[in-house]
Amino acid sequence: MRIDKWLSSVNVVKRRTIAQDMVKSGVVFINGVKAKPSKEVKVGDRVIIEYLKGPREYEVLAIPTTKTIPKSKKEEYVREL
């Protein structure tokens, strides 16, 4: 799954367009490498987002099969480190 799609699917960001803008701005890293919008994420990858207040790191636990998941199921797909 593409990084921008994954970020919005697992409710890390609210909308996919925001996720695309963040990736294009260069604030999203996958395993320490700056991500492009088309970069695929896999189970076990570490995603770092550089916010103004400081970086946040997430671990990919599973790839969703649907467009969005319920917020109550977020823990099954992503873990904040």
Image (spheres, rainbow, N blue to C red):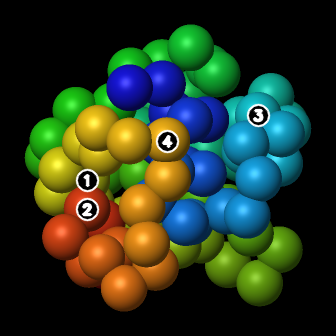
Reading the image, the residue beneath label 1 is: 60
Q: Earlier in the sequence, mark 4 or mark 2?
A: 4
Q: CA distance from mark 2 to mark 1?
A: 6 Å
Residue 12: where, in percent of width, then height? 56, 66
Residue at position x 53%, y 73% in the image: 56
| Element carrying mark 1 | strand
Reading the image, the residue beneath label 3 is: 20
Residue 24: where, in percent of width, then height? 80, 28
| Element carrying mark 2 | helix
Specify the quadrant of the image occupied by residue 36.
top right
Q: Earlier in the sequence, mark 3 or mark 2?
A: 3
Q: Residues within 10 Å of mark 4 (few under 14, many from 20)?
A: few
| Element carrying mark 3 | helix
- In the image, residue 26 sits, relative to residue 72, either above or below, namely above
Q: Earlier in the sequence, mark 1 or mark 4?
A: 1
Specify the quadrant of the image occupied by residue 13.
bottom right
Q: Earlier in the sequence, mark 4 or mark 3?
A: 3
Is residue 13 visible in the rendered image? The answer is yes
Reading the image, the residue beneath label 4 is: 67
Q: Which mark is residue 77?
A: 2
Q: CA distance from mark 1 to mark 4?
A: 16 Å
Q: CA distance from mark 3 to mark 2?
A: 20 Å
Residue 10: where, in percent of width, then height? 45, 59
| Residue type, mark 1 in image | Val
Between label 1 and label 4, give the one nearer the viewer: 4
Between label 4 and label 3, give the one nearer the viewer: 4
